[in-house]
Amino acid sequence: MPPLVYFFGNGRADGTREMKGVLGSKGANLAEMTNLGVPVPPGFTIATSACMEYLTSGGIPEALRAEVAANVTRLEETTGKRLGDAGNPLLVSVRSGAAVSMPGMMETILNLGLNDETVEGLARLADNPRFAWDSYRRFIQMYADVVLGVPGSQFESLLAGKRLLHKVESDSGLPEATLRTLVTQYKALVRNATDRDFPADPQEQLWGAIEAVWRSWTLKKAVDYRKVNNIPNDLGTGVNIVAMVFGNMGEDSGTGVAFTRDPSTGERKFYGEFLVNAQGEDVVAGIRTPLHIDEMAQRLPAAYGELMAVQERLESHYRDMQDLEFTVERGTLYLLQTRTGKRTAAAAVRIARDMVDDGLIASDEALQRVNASQLDQLLHPVIDPGARATPLVTGLPASPGAASGVAVFDSDVAVARAAGGEAVILVREETTPEDFHGMVAARAILTTRGGMTSHAAVVARGMGKCAVVGARDVTVDGEKRQFRANGTVVSEGDWITLDGASGRVFVGDLPTVPSEVVRVTQGSLVASRAPVYEAYARVLAWADEARTLRVRANADTPKDARQARGFGAEGIGLCRTEHMFFEGDRIHAMREMIVARDEGGRRRALAKLLPMQRADFEAIFEAMNGYPVNIRLLDPPLHEFLPHGGEESKLLARGLRLTRAELAHIVEGLRESNPMLGHRGCRLGITYPEITEMQGRAIFEAAVRARKRGIEVQVEIMVPLVAAVKEFSHQKAILEDIARQVLGPLGPVNYEIGTMIELPRAALTAAEIAREAAFFSFGTNDLTQTTLGLSRDDAGRFLPGYVERGILPDDPFQTLDINGVGKLVRMAVDDGRAARPGLKTGICGEHGGDPRSIMFCHQAGLNYVSCSPYRVPIARLAAAQAALAH
């Protein structure tokens, strides 16, 4: 049986970085750094499996207790100190660490082992009583909050009162006597809140902390983080017990967080912050506004020089940008953590490109380093440079992008107002992991405290949210739900705009303009003057070389088609012809066709629509010159084109020369109990073949006209909602007859007729359909609805609860249901190609832009995915990652 506890110290460790699944990311990296000879305090890691065992059984095996005891003894021998020894006490930190890094989402306890006796011993050893009592009050506050459930805000209130009394801004200005008083008050607070004394036995403290770290795996903030980042719930967390080193021992001590490259831009520049005479949570929590890392060179020059050498070594070893936590104790440097650093999309593509250019990694590995979904950030708008507005304040530009919304001061309020459709910006003095759900709901985050490595900054960058932190001129009043800045009061519900690239905050809803990447694709910015675009384009060029899946776009207008091509789309996978009917005068002609009393009336109305459709198709063929264009015939039920009462019905009746009663009778006759499964798709074309005739004629005439202008046309005509092969054959015969009429005198056009697989019966009878159809396009939106029996419009009321309870792993309308819908797709592909070798297959639902669904599409052997134009870059990279993974 493998051990449950792994030791590291004195240059040797029981683990390595390859053991993240066993030790968690933090434990594996502590072991790796120890083996590299990097200065790391000694300690040991409890395996992640112990967490899941504890959460399942609720008990602690005796074998684990024995292993922990043996490793405590080993740690005591290594340090020369003993846990609970009043003369030479060993103090430890107890930290979480899952296999996938979850910054700030689980619990940490520092200075464990302190009590009324060991604090005196620590004071004598350090010859610094103030430091010892500062460490003790920190320990009580942290332990009581994390383990005993006493809200940390109650301790903060007492601490704030002492700062006010002594007229100091930070805790470091409080004298020893005040810290002694705080310890007494803190213990009394614990007694009143829990009806028990604060535990003095270090062994009780240790196991209380270990269990609290395990339980923190189930905290709401941790569960929410895993949900947002698609992290499995069964990994568990390791527990890292590490000998304490102290950054709060005086002016020759300190603590900090740093990145080996700029996490916002990707620039090859050491980037970070530190505080003198502080402990780690002071930096991360934003309790004090930190100093720039460059100032460490003057304040702690020897430690800074060693830190620079260590960060170079770690980045070279891990071959990726590293996020470091360090402490300096009386001039001696210790590394407490290294992990792959969270970064913006702009930083991700630049770091990937630069590391390839520097020979650190190959292009295939670089592609795996960039989160495909994160590319969406590069398409975010920025504040219009021409907007005339004066910044209210300027803070630190923690995460780029621009966002406007109403100010809110509470995470629960942010969630509620966002659920109601409002754009919200979360404003806090500082965020904590408990704010994670509010940060997910918000468009952007503004804090008055903290630096570029604070919780708000790190989490916002990881989520691609705009964030401005450390805006010192902002004073937040949570009770009044408002903030003040430079004489201006902003109340909850007032609009503000944040510029995450410059750190500026504005009052009001400012206009935005397209991002650098979008402007280049639109031709309004030269690529050579767009450094972010250059790195982005380089990464996507590697992706295009690596992938086998083609990437198309869903585009209904010439403008959408041109945008799609700018983003690298290799054709149109879905052109929804019904969207064309809603523009301008077209809707009137469409409605005239619907209310016509006979075929002659319908044909007269359709004749008006023909030149409109033909012009649209010709413009789309022009935009996609040389690339395939897949045009879906009319799909929605006819009642969707008609008004259902009110002034619009009155005007329509007058325009169609009908009485309102006659129009109401027609509308009522078209009403269906379940229109999604009603008279729509190919069923309309079978009932009213003249509709299919008109659309076929518009397509073929447009193709001929485009070809005459030198445009290479590849057209695919898609028959929707086919359930039986005879439905498809009926529509195909009409289209081929129109093709002969149009193309006979005008010459050949490259065209194919296929179908959309969006009903389970179509998937089950794919072999029959494939004998007639030249291609399959999987309409996974409707295929998901019809397979799961879910209405996409109504299921939002209960689907989130299904995902939270684990009934479904994901929202099936966002990520493809591989075990259900996926089986139908695989079956249809396999059976279809057995009947028609070389059958072209693709996907055109929203899943075509989802990286995990794209992975499935690659595995299932599809030829292409199709998605909205702005998802095309994501799909290109995700397709490459799928190819490299298999």
Image (cartoon, grey):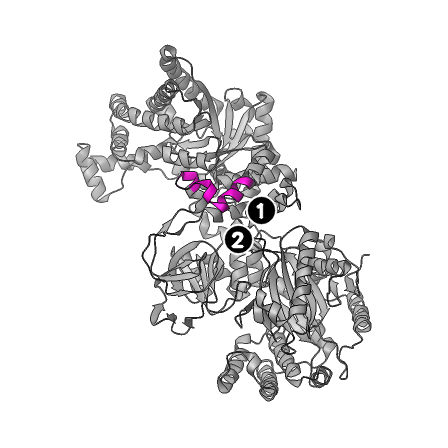
On the rendered structure, is 520 left or right of 491? right
Q: Residues within 10 Å of mark 2 (few under 14, many from 20)?
A: many
Task: Identify the residue position indicated by label 2 in the image.
Answer: 265
Q: Quadrant of the N terminus?
A: bottom right
The answer to whether residue 613 is visible is yes
Amino acid type shown at disc 1: Val
Q: Is residue 296 magenta?
A: no
- N-term-proximal mark, 2 vs 1: 2
On the rendered structure, is 838 left or right of 671? right
The percent position of residue 385, horizontal first and vertical second, equals 36, 52
Q: Nearer the viewer, residue 516 or 650?
A: 516
Residue at 36% x, 28% y is 619
Q: Quadrant of the C terminus?
A: top right
For marks 2 and 1, give the CA distance: 14 Å
Q: Residues within 10 Å of mark 1 (few under 14, many from 20)?
A: many
Amino acid type shown at disc 2: Thr
Instruction: Considering the whole magenta stretch, tell me its main secondary structure.
Output: helix
Task: Identify the residue position indicated by label 1 in the image.
Answer: 370
Residue at 38% x, 24% y is 686
Q: Which mark is residue 803?
A: none
Q: Nearer the viewer, residue 668 or 706?
A: 706
The answer to whether residue 628 is above or below residue 668 is above
The answer to whether residue 152 is above or below residue 653 is below
Element type at mark 2 = loop
Q: Does the residue at mark 2 contact the one at mark 1 (Cβ under 8 Å)?
A: no
Specify the segment rendered in magenta.
520-538
Element type at mark 1 = loop
The percent position of residue 85, horizontal first and vertical second, equals 77, 81
Quarter residue 314 falls in = bottom right
Q: How many marks?
A: 2
Quarter residue 879 falls in = top right
